[in-house]
Image (tube, rainbow, N blue to C red):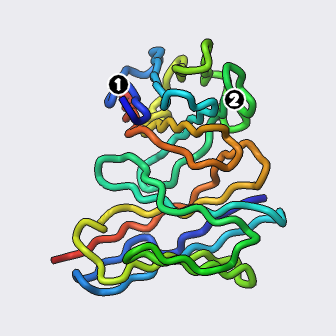
Amino acid sequence: GAGVSQTPSNKVTEKGKYVELRCDPISGHTALYWYRQSLGQGPEFLIYFQGTGAADDSGLPNDRFFAVRPEGSVSTLKIQRTERGDSAVYLCASSLTGENTEAFFGQGTRLTVV
Amino acid sequence: AQKVTQAQTEISVVEKEDVTLDCVYETRDTTYYLFWYKQPPSGELVFLIRRNSFDEQNEISGRYSWNFQKSTSSFNFTITASQVVDSAVYFCALNQLGNTGKLIFGQGTTLQVKP
Protein backbone atom coordinates (compact mmCIF):
# COMPACT_ATOMS: atom_id res chain seq x y z
CA GLY A 1 0.00 0.00 0.00
CA ALA A 2 0.95 3.64 -0.21
CA GLY A 3 0.91 4.43 3.50
CA VAL A 4 2.41 3.09 6.71
CA SER A 5 0.73 -0.16 7.66
CA GLN A 6 0.54 -1.52 11.20
CA THR A 7 -0.69 -4.91 12.26
CA PRO A 8 -2.62 -5.96 14.16
CA SER A 9 -4.93 -2.99 14.58
CA ASN A 10 -6.00 -4.32 17.95
CA LYS A 11 -4.30 -6.72 20.33
CA VAL A 12 -5.59 -7.97 23.66
CA THR A 13 -3.16 -9.95 25.74
CA GLU A 14 -2.91 -11.25 29.27
CA LYS A 15 -0.54 -9.75 31.78
CA GLY A 16 2.84 -11.43 31.58
CA LYS A 17 2.55 -12.50 27.94
CA TYR A 18 4.86 -11.57 25.08
CA VAL A 19 3.58 -9.51 22.15
CA GLU A 20 4.92 -8.39 18.79
CA LEU A 21 3.64 -5.38 16.88
CA ARG A 22 4.51 -4.99 13.23
CA CYS A 23 5.12 -1.87 11.13
CA ASP A 24 5.44 -1.79 7.36
CA PRO A 25 6.76 1.66 6.37
CA ILE A 26 6.38 3.51 3.12
CA SER A 27 8.64 1.96 0.50
CA GLY A 28 11.97 3.74 0.24
CA HIS A 29 11.75 5.48 3.61
CA THR A 30 14.97 4.96 5.51
CA ALA A 31 13.79 6.42 8.80
CA LEU A 32 11.29 4.62 11.03
CA TYR A 33 9.91 5.66 14.40
CA TRP A 34 7.86 4.03 17.13
CA TYR A 35 5.74 6.14 19.45
CA ARG A 36 3.38 5.21 22.28
CA GLN A 37 0.19 7.15 22.88
CA SER A 38 -1.71 6.76 26.13
CA LEU A 39 -5.33 7.82 26.40
CA GLY A 40 -5.71 11.58 26.32
CA GLN A 41 -2.01 12.21 25.76
CA GLY A 42 0.24 13.08 22.89
CA PRO A 43 2.47 10.44 21.34
CA GLU A 44 5.72 9.74 23.18
CA PHE A 45 8.85 8.77 21.30
CA LEU A 46 10.17 5.26 21.85
CA ILE A 47 12.82 4.45 19.23
CA TYR A 48 14.19 5.62 15.89
CA PHE A 49 15.75 3.48 13.16
CA GLN A 50 17.93 4.76 10.35
CA GLY A 51 18.12 1.81 8.00
CA THR A 52 18.65 -1.36 9.98
CA GLY A 53 20.18 0.23 13.06
CA ALA A 54 18.51 1.77 16.08
CA ALA A 55 19.96 5.27 16.00
CA ASP A 56 18.10 6.45 19.09
CA ASP A 57 16.37 4.16 21.59
CA SER A 58 16.28 6.67 24.42
CA GLY A 59 12.50 6.49 24.68
CA LEU A 60 12.20 2.80 25.42
CA PRO A 61 10.80 2.69 28.97
CA ASN A 62 12.68 -0.41 30.16
CA ASP A 63 14.36 -3.58 29.00
CA ARG A 64 11.04 -5.34 28.41
CA PHE A 65 10.74 -3.30 25.23
CA PHE A 66 12.81 -4.11 22.18
CA ALA A 67 12.52 -3.33 18.47
CA VAL A 68 14.19 -4.63 15.34
CA ARG A 69 14.37 -3.73 11.69
CA PRO A 70 16.58 -6.46 10.21
CA GLU A 71 16.31 -5.58 6.54
CA GLY A 72 15.79 -1.86 6.82
CA SER A 73 12.11 -2.04 5.96
CA VAL A 74 9.58 -3.80 8.21
CA SER A 75 10.02 -3.26 11.93
CA THR A 76 8.75 -5.24 14.89
CA LEU A 77 8.24 -3.84 18.36
CA LYS A 78 8.49 -6.57 20.97
CA ILE A 79 7.22 -6.35 24.51
CA GLN A 80 8.08 -9.04 27.04
CA ARG A 81 6.21 -9.82 30.25
CA THR A 82 3.50 -7.30 29.44
CA GLU A 83 2.02 -5.21 32.23
CA ARG A 84 -1.33 -3.43 32.42
CA GLY A 85 0.52 -0.12 32.19
CA ASP A 86 1.73 -1.07 28.72
CA SER A 87 -1.83 -0.63 27.43
CA ALA A 88 -1.76 2.14 24.85
CA VAL A 89 -1.83 2.81 21.13
CA TYR A 90 1.52 2.11 19.53
CA LEU A 91 2.15 4.30 16.51
CA CYS A 92 4.70 3.77 13.81
CA ALA A 93 5.93 6.49 11.45
CA SER A 94 8.35 6.62 8.58
CA SER A 95 10.08 9.44 6.75
CA LEU A 96 12.28 9.66 3.70
CA THR A 97 15.54 10.47 5.45
CA GLY A 98 14.76 11.30 9.05
CA GLU A 99 16.38 14.72 9.01
CA ASN A 100 13.30 16.77 9.82
CA THR A 101 11.50 15.49 6.76
CA GLU A 102 7.77 14.91 7.04
CA ALA A 103 6.89 11.80 9.03
CA PHE A 104 3.93 9.72 7.90
CA PHE A 105 2.09 7.82 10.59
CA GLY A 106 0.23 4.55 10.55
CA GLN A 107 -3.13 4.07 12.22
CA GLY A 108 -1.56 2.40 15.21
CA THR A 109 -1.97 -0.82 17.15
CA ARG A 110 -4.19 -0.59 20.19
CA LEU A 111 -2.68 -2.86 22.83
CA THR A 112 -4.77 -3.86 25.82
CA VAL A 113 -3.19 -5.85 28.61
CA VAL A 114 -5.75 -7.52 30.87
CA ALA B 1 14.86 20.25 27.83
CA GLN B 2 12.26 20.45 25.12
CA LYS B 3 8.57 20.74 25.94
CA VAL B 4 5.34 21.57 24.13
CA THR B 5 2.27 22.82 25.97
CA GLN B 6 -1.24 22.90 24.56
CA ALA B 7 -3.21 24.44 27.38
CA GLN B 8 -6.61 23.96 25.77
CA THR B 9 -7.76 20.41 26.42
CA GLU B 10 -11.08 20.67 24.61
CA ILE B 11 -12.72 23.32 22.46
CA SER B 12 -16.27 23.25 21.17
CA VAL B 13 -17.49 25.60 18.45
CA VAL B 14 -20.43 25.87 16.12
CA GLU B 15 -19.85 25.36 12.43
CA LYS B 16 -18.58 28.45 10.58
CA GLU B 17 -16.98 29.93 13.68
CA ASP B 18 -13.27 30.69 13.65
CA VAL B 19 -11.17 28.87 16.22
CA THR B 20 -7.56 29.22 17.37
CA LEU B 21 -5.58 26.40 18.92
CA ASP B 22 -2.70 27.52 21.11
CA CYS B 23 0.76 26.00 21.27
CA VAL B 24 3.64 27.14 23.45
CA TYR B 25 7.03 25.47 23.30
CA GLU B 26 10.26 25.41 25.27
CA THR B 27 13.67 24.68 23.85
CA ARG B 28 17.24 25.80 24.39
CA ASP B 29 18.09 25.14 20.78
CA THR B 30 18.44 28.02 18.36
CA THR B 31 17.42 25.90 15.42
CA TYR B 32 14.36 23.71 15.50
CA TYR B 33 11.20 22.73 13.65
CA LEU B 34 7.59 23.07 14.73
CA PHE B 35 4.74 20.92 13.45
CA TRP B 36 0.99 20.56 13.63
CA TYR B 37 -0.71 17.20 13.18
CA LYS B 38 -4.41 16.30 13.05
CA GLN B 39 -5.66 13.03 14.53
CA PRO B 40 -9.19 12.15 13.39
CA PRO B 41 -11.16 9.36 15.09
CA SER B 42 -9.49 6.81 12.80
CA GLY B 43 -6.32 7.38 14.80
CA GLU B 44 -3.85 8.18 12.06
CA LEU B 45 -1.82 11.35 12.56
CA VAL B 46 -2.11 13.61 9.54
CA PHE B 47 0.67 16.11 8.86
CA LEU B 48 -0.53 19.71 8.48
CA ILE B 49 2.52 21.95 8.54
CA ARG B 50 6.23 22.17 9.34
CA ARG B 51 7.89 25.48 10.15
CA ASN B 52 11.58 26.05 10.87
CA SER B 53 12.74 28.44 13.55
CA PHE B 54 14.27 30.87 11.08
CA ASP B 55 11.03 31.50 9.29
CA GLU B 56 8.59 33.60 11.30
CA GLN B 57 6.41 34.43 8.37
CA ASN B 58 2.80 33.50 8.96
CA GLU B 59 1.35 30.88 6.63
CA ILE B 60 -2.09 30.41 5.21
CA SER B 61 -3.40 27.30 3.51
CA GLY B 62 -7.03 27.50 2.60
CA ARG B 63 -9.01 27.81 5.83
CA TYR B 64 -5.92 27.07 7.92
CA SER B 65 -3.41 29.64 9.10
CA TRP B 66 -0.46 29.54 11.47
CA ASN B 67 1.04 32.33 13.57
CA PHE B 68 4.64 31.70 14.66
CA GLN B 69 5.99 34.15 17.25
CA LYS B 70 9.47 33.39 18.43
CA SER B 71 9.35 36.18 21.03
CA THR B 72 6.59 34.37 22.91
CA SER B 73 7.61 30.83 21.87
CA SER B 74 4.19 30.24 20.37
CA PHE B 75 2.97 28.57 17.22
CA ASN B 76 -0.79 29.00 17.11
CA PHE B 77 -3.14 27.43 14.59
CA THR B 78 -6.36 29.07 13.38
CA ILE B 79 -9.17 27.42 11.47
CA THR B 80 -11.41 29.89 9.71
CA ALA B 81 -15.07 29.07 9.08
CA SER B 82 -14.82 25.72 10.85
CA GLN B 83 -16.59 22.66 9.50
CA VAL B 84 -17.82 19.47 11.15
CA VAL B 85 -15.03 17.55 9.37
CA ASP B 86 -12.48 19.61 11.30
CA SER B 87 -13.50 17.75 14.47
CA ALA B 88 -10.39 15.90 15.64
CA VAL B 89 -7.52 16.04 18.10
CA TYR B 90 -4.80 18.46 17.06
CA PHE B 91 -1.21 18.10 18.17
CA CYS B 92 1.60 20.60 18.12
CA ALA B 93 5.11 19.11 18.02
CA LEU B 94 8.75 20.20 18.15
CA ASN B 95 12.05 18.77 17.09
CA GLN B 96 15.65 19.90 16.91
CA LEU B 97 17.15 20.75 13.55
CA GLY B 98 19.74 18.21 12.57
CA ASN B 99 18.55 15.76 15.17
CA THR B 100 17.09 12.36 14.47
CA GLY B 101 13.78 13.87 13.53
CA LYS B 102 12.01 12.55 16.61
CA LEU B 103 9.09 14.68 17.66
CA ILE B 104 8.14 16.05 21.07
CA PHE B 105 4.35 16.32 21.12
CA GLY B 106 2.01 18.43 23.19
CA GLN B 107 -0.92 16.89 25.00
CA GLY B 108 -3.30 17.70 22.17
CA THR B 109 -6.45 19.80 21.85
CA THR B 110 -9.74 18.09 21.07
CA LEU B 111 -11.79 20.23 18.72
CA GLN B 112 -15.49 19.56 18.36
CA VAL B 113 -17.32 21.41 15.64
CA LYS B 114 -21.08 21.18 15.99
CA PRO B 115 -23.44 21.62 13.06
- Label at residue A50: 2
Q: Quadrant of the C terminus of chain B?
A: bottom left
Of the residues tagged 1 and 2, which is closer to the observer?
2
Please state the horizontal and vertical placement of residue B84, each as a whole percent of the image: 22, 70
- Label at residue A8: 1
Badge 1: how crowded within 10 Å, few (<14), some, or many (20+)? Answer: some
B96 relative to A31 in the view: left or right: right
Nearer the N terminus, badge 1 or badge 2? Answer: 1
Q: Is residue A7 above or below residue A105?
A: above
The kind of residue on which mark 1 rests is Pro
Residue A68 in view (yes/no): no
Residue A53 in view (yes/no): yes
The kind of residue on which mark 2 rests is Gln
A38 relative to B56 in the view: left or right: left
Q: Is residue B103 above or below residue A31?
A: below
Question: Chain under label 2?
Answer: A
Residue drawn at 39 percent across, 61 percent down = B89
Q: Is residue A54 above or below residue B82?
A: above
